[in-house]
């Protein structure tokens, strides 16, 4: 087992990390996005199913495709951010299980039931989206996750002809300190957890 991370690392990941609303004019390179994905892909998923698909919207042309589907309150954030990633869930994830889970060739059949398939994709794709935010923070990037967008419009624009359905979007880059809201309260242990 690994030793606990330093307090500095914990602060960067959780205690001092904030949702960015404004962005510095500092680019995020393609190499950084490749490094980010190489961290994200190591996070655990059920049967190593890895259903998340990541579309990194970076170019002006790609942003112009995304912006009509983003809520008015989020449009300025997407415009200013160096990158906004669309985290989608691939409902055909089982097709890749012979490669991802090679030690049991029955694995694809576990997801023949659409209800099992869909909930597995949502649960594990959401996990991978959270891994993306944590991994981004380890690389010194800030995150601005959003659910204020038209899923159907995004799916038509970016995932037409595929089994991928958008889950949420998250801007990435170097956040500006101005525009941060005061830290909102969190629930106490007693209000949210129990040791049984």
Image: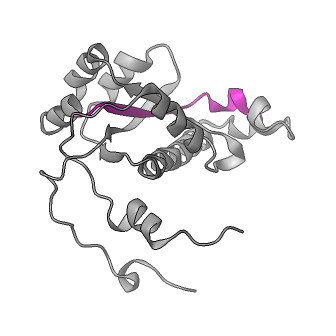
Quarter of the figure with residue 169: top left
Residue 156 location (% of width, % of height): 36, 18
User: Residue 145: within the magenta?
Assistant: no
Residue 28 location (% of width, % of height): 36, 32
* Nearer to me, 114 or 119: 119
Q: Residue at x 33, y 46 (%)?
A: 143
Quadrant of the drawing holding the C terminus = bottom right
**Image side of residue 101 versus residue 10, left or right:** right
Quarter of the figure with residue 112: top right
Residue 12 location (% of width, % of height): 39, 61
* Nearer to me, 181 or 138: 138
Look at the picture and state if 151 lies above or below 139.
Answer: above
The residue segment tinted magenta is: 81-97
Q: Residue at x 59, y 38 (%)?
A: 38
* Nearer to me, 104 or 38: 38
Q: How is the image coloured?
A: one colour
Look at the picture and state if 126 lies above or below 54.
Answer: below
Look at the picture and state if 64 lies above or below 89.
Answer: above
Quarter of the figure with residue 105: top right
Quadrant of the drawing holding the N terminus = bottom right
Residue 77 location (% of width, % of height): 19, 37
* Nearer to me, 102 or 138: 138
Count of picture labels: 0
**Image side of residue 147 versus residue 119, left or right:** left
Q: Residue at x 35, y 25 (%)?
A: 57
């Amino acid at each position: 087992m690994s030793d606990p991370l330093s307090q500095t690392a914990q602060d960067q990941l959780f205690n001092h990390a904030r949702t960015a609303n404004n962005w510095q004019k500092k680019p995020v390179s393609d190499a950084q996005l490749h490094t980010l994905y190489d961290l994200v892909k190591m996070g655990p998923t059920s049967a190593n199913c890895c259903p998340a698909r990541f579309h990194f919207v970076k170019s002006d042309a790609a942003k112009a495709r995304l912006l009509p589907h983003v809520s008015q309150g989020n449009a300025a954030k997407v415009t200013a951010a160096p990158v906004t990633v669309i985290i989608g869930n691939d409902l055909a994830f089982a097709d890749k299980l012979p490669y991802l889970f090679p030690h049991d060739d029955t694995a694809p059949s576990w997801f023949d039931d659409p209800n099992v398939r869909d909930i597995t994709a949502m649960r594990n794709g959401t996990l991978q989206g959270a891994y993306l935010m944590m991994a981004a923070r380890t690389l010194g990037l800030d995150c601005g996750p959003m659910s204020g967008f038209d899923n159907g419009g995004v799916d038509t624009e970016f995932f037409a002809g595929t089994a991928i359905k958008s889950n949420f979007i998250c801007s990435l880059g170097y956040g500006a300190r101005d525009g941060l809201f005061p830290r909102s309260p969190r629930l106490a242990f007693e209000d949210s957890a129990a040791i049984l």
